[in-house]
Image: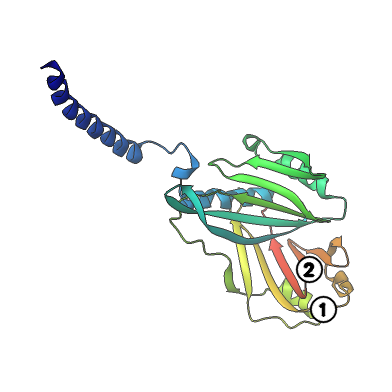
């Protein structure tokens, strides 16, 4: 009967179609470039994030800045059936109160044109947004009066690697040693280092230490270099090519010495 003949053909046609789809999927996975961020792993995106932070450093001038450790958040969902992780790297910049918008505008103008960086006012404060490519988002926002935080983030990706940052046990260095001595603090045996690649080669670096109780005043630092930021809770100065940032906003004193990108 015609109906039974159709049923006999339906099964092999369906099987052949399924085999064809499976073959095309196998070929696409191995040969086609990714088209959405969920197909690019955390390891593949990490280098884009690193280079983006280096670009942000290069966009700064004589500002008081420091690189902050990478932050990896696990447990997000790449798909309904697959867990993932997100990577965020940061850069904090201290400015005089009221100088936050000018900093964001200046950085936006110095970023690559294809990042399409722009600054807009959101909830009464300026905010920078840009696209570093490969689904890596750039953000710059005011997190406190006189403090702007830049970040480069991957969004949720398949987690295929471990992110090791910062490098611990790094030498404290002469700039931090001098600052600690001026404040009457003992230098710890080692510091933490965070780095990022500069666009023209070399690396930007921040070496930081967390030491004892906050002193009553940071005035003892004034002879050590050219003042960049002078506030009761945050002080920064430049000594040669190194900017030293002293943070007294918490219960313990924190110091960071950063070397930027040449040119």
Quadrant for the N terminus, please: top left
Residue 247 or 262: which is nearer the viewer? 247
Question: Mark 1 near mark 2, Cβ–Cβ under 8 Å?
Answer: yes
With 86 as the anchor, is 246 left or right in this view? right
* Residue located 60% across and 54% down the image: 88
Q: Nearer the viewer, residue 125 or 44?
A: 125
* Gap between marks 1 and 2 measured at Cα: 11 Å
At mark 2, the secondary structure is: strand
The reply to whether residue 140 is in sight is yes
Q: Position of residue 132 (x, y in %)?
A: 60, 42
Q: Residue 126 location, x and y as percent?
A: 79, 44
Residue under circle 1?
183
Residue pictured at 87% horizontal, 55% vertical = 97
Q: Secondary structure at mark 1?
A: loop
| In the rendered image, the vertical position of residue 156 relative to residue 172, given as above or below | above
Q: Residues within 10 Å of mark 1 (few under 14, many from 20)?
A: some
Image side of residue 148 versus residue 55, left or right: right
Say how the picture is coloured. Answer: rainbow
Q: Which circle's residue, 1 or 2, is located before the other in the chain?
A: 1
Residue 190 quadrant: bottom right
Give the x, y percent position of residue 220. Answer: 87, 75
Residue drawn at x 43%, y 39% as measured from the top left? 34
Residue closest to the eye, 78 or 91 = 78
Find residue 246 and name its label.
2
């Amino acid at each position: 009967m015609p109906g039974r003949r159709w049923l006999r053909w339906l099964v092999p046609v369906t099987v052949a179609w399924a085999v064809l789809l499976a073959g095309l999927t196998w070929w696409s996975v191995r040969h086609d470039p990714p088209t959405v961020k969920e197909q690019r792993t955390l390891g593949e995106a990490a280098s884009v994030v690193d280079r983006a932070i280096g670009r942000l450093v290069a966009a700064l001038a004589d500002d008081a800045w420091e690189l902050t450790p990478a932050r990896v958040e696990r447990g997000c969902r790449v798909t309904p059936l697959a867990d993932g992780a997100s990577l965020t790297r940061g850069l904090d910049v201290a400015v005089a109160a009221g100088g936050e918008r000018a900093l964001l505008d200046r950085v936006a103008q110095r970023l690559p044109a294809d990042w399409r960086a722009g600054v807009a006012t959101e909830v009464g404060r300026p905010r920078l947004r840009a696209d570093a490519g490969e689904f890596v988002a750039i953000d710059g926002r005011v997190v406190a009066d006189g403090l702007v935080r830049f970040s480069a983030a991957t969004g949720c990706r398949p987690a295929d690697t471990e992110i090791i940052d910062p490098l611990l046990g790094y030498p404290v260095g002469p700039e931090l040693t001098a600052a600690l001595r001026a404040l009457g603090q003992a230098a710890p045996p080692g510091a933490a280092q965070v780095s990022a690649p500069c666009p023209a080669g070399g690396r930007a670096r921040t070496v930081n230490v967390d030491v004892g109780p906050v002193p009553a005043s940071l005035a003892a630092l004034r002879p050590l270099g050219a003042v960049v930021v002078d506030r009761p809770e945050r002080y920064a100065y430049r000594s040669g090519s190194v900017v030293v940032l002293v943070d007294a906003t918490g219960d313990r004193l924190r110091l960071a010495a950063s070397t930027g990108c040449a040119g």
